[in-house]
Amino acid sequence: MDQIFDNFLFIYPAIMLLEAAGIVLSILYMHYSSKHRNYTLSAAWYICAVFFNLITLIVFLVKKKDFPSADNSFCNQCGKQFPSSFQVCPDCMIDLQKAHTEEKNSYRKKAKVFGVLLVIVYVISVIIGVLFGVAVSIDAFENLDYILSDELSYYDASDRIAVDGLFYDQKGNSYQNEADVLLYDEQGRVYKYTVKEYYDKDVDLTYNEEYYIRDDGEKYFPYDCYVNEDGWFYCDKGSLLEIYEEDTASMSEEELDAYYNDLLNDHNNEYRYFDYPYVDAEGNRYYCAYEASWNAAGKLITDEADITTK
């Protein structure tokens, strides 16, 4: 689900922009449409259009039929409007005036243009909403299928880096299969990734349980396992580590753009685990054990330059 939101990151500013455009266009439409009908909207209409845009627009369209006709005559003295058949104001007894035809036509044209643009904005909003809803639904079904898969394994989604087609551990030993890479702690103990398959007859589901098993038989849940910057095994049973976040507050606008462009490129091209390390309270960095990679010299790969030993 997070990946869907990342891929549709543009939706948030787009929705905000469309909402703002919808408010402005609806206000302009109501303003010129009422002016064309010889009616002046009160300030309450504009305020409601800002905070309750769609509801206000619907009420306006319903009430619009009660506005004076565009062909009404008006009295220059009392300001009252009368049907076009009236020639004289019955109150002031002076000749009535016709609204300026060019001005009325201008109001009508503007109301039509803003009305069309408003419809386009709402159609685009609906299309984006539908596409986003479909994407979320597809992602939800794919995640459900992933969870129920009887071949579920952490290494199905790992990103351990191969060097010339081989995977290496901290001691420089090479492996054909990334799941066979051994981990070591500072006391010299060895940790091996192990998968055990279980069958639950109640739900007719076969599933896997993954562990890092130490050479003395101690088991560790993979998502608790990390390696530090020196490549030594570390278990975070207390969940003390947090994902490292770059300090963007001190970045200039150009640096910030470059930083987010790099992140987008990582997602769109080739994800590298070392772009997303974890840190402890002292700022020491750690990397997920099931993704940690070493080059042929046994150096932990924490940068593109570390992949080769040359």
Image (tube, grey):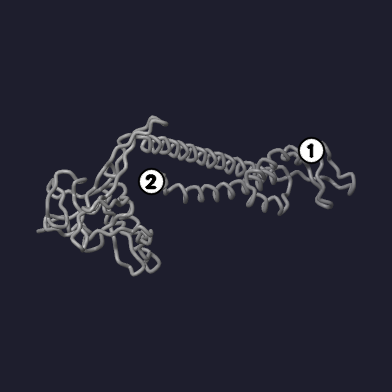
Residue type, numbered disc 1: Ser
Marks 1/2: CA distance? Answer: 63 Å
Q: Nearer the viewer, residue 256 or 272?
A: 272
Marks 1 and 2: which is nearer the front? 2
Image vertical order of residue 212 relative to residue 283, above or below: above
Q: Would residue 141 be found to the left or right of residue 21 on screen?
A: left
| The C terminus: image quadrant | bottom left
Q: Nearer the viewer, residue 136 or 65?
A: 136
Q: Is residue 102 visible?
A: no
Q: Where on the picture, by quarter, is residue 292?
A: bottom left
Q: Would residue 124 be found to the left or right of residue 160 on screen?
A: right
Tell me the SS state at disc 2. Answer: helix
Q: Is residue 309 visible?
A: yes
Residue type, numbered disc 2: Gln
* Residue at figure coordinates x 76%, y 39% from the top left: 66
Question: Residue 90: image x %, image y %?
Answer: 89, 44
* Residue at figure coordinates x 53%, y 39% from the top left: 120
User: Among all residues in the image, which is located at the extreme front?
Assistant: 216
Question: Residue 257: image x %, image y %?
Answer: 35, 59
Asked if marks 1 and 2 touch (Cβ < 8 Å), the reply is no
Q: Nearer the viewer, residue 309 or 82?
A: 309
* Residue at figure coordinates x 54%, y 42% from the top left: 117
* Residue at figure coordinates x 66%, y 48% from the top left: 31
Name the residue that disc number 2 marks.
3
Tell me the SS state at disc 1. Answer: loop
Q: Nearer the viewer, residue 139 or 299?
A: 299
Image vertical order of residue 73 relative to residue 282, above or below: above
Name the residue that disc number 1 marks.
84
